Image (cartoon, rainbow, N blue to C red):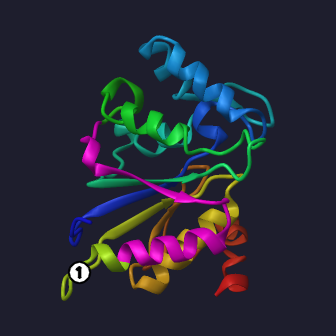
Amino acid sequence: MPILHDMRILIHTVGNADVGSTSGGNLVARCAALRAMPRQDAAEKLQQSAPAESGGDPRPTPLVAVLDREKGTTDYDRILLIVSIPQDENDTEFTSDLGPIIKEHLSEEWTYGRTLPADAVELLEIKAPLSSETRPLLGGWISGSAGAGHPLPDVDVSFIRGSNGAGLGLITAAIEAGTPPTVILPADERLDLSRQIPTPESRQICEPLKEIR
């Protein structure tokens, strides 16, 4: 594991939103379709989400929104993609097939607007998008990646609807490790937990942290 002190990392829980869909459905079939279509067509599928619940135009997928250069967002030294593994032969909603596809497209600028080398994108596996899975996983990863006596990496966590449990576990793990993260909320509000008091709108998302500390 590389020593990542003085770096900024993005942690993203992979899900249906990354292929432009709401939760549910056969993610295995969607991944097979992505693999079968031309590269540029697959890139477009990874860029555009389904329309908002209230109607209107489609929105960018979560990673496109987070990595949008035009908004002046942070350049990351490393990205961790949290993926779930199948629980049985009938499971069609696991994300461990989608993670490698996203990793490949992160090396091509036309998909996400910026590129990272393959060794700067890491896949971490969980059984389910729950805080009980992500909290120890990230806690162990941070403690192993920070060299003794060196500053901890700066951490951003993308907080995605549909993966609240996973997101809360990631946020809690980072706080416990001593590196309070910047939380990127669905409306692209950025909440720096090291210095910023949550707004009334974001406080409702952070409230469940009290239940898992």
Total label count?
Answer: 1
Give the magenta part as a residue range: 115-142
Can you see residue 57? yes
Direction from residue 1 to residue 138 in the image, left or right: right
Q: Against 61, is 188 above or below?
A: below
Question: How far across and down, in percent of the image, does residue 149 sit?
Answer: 18, 88
Can you see residue 75? no
Residue drawn at x 66%, y 39% is 16
- Residue underneath mark 1: 151
Residue 127 covered by magenta stretch: yes
Q: Residue furthest top?
A: 38
Q: Quadrant of residue 200?
A: bottom right
Question: How far across and down, in percent of the image, does residue 57 sit?
Answer: 67, 25
Residue drawn at x 79%, y 29% is 55
The residue under label 1 is which amino acid type?
A: Pro
Q: Report the front residue among 141 and 52.
A: 141
Tell me the quadrant of the picture where the C terminus can be found.
bottom right
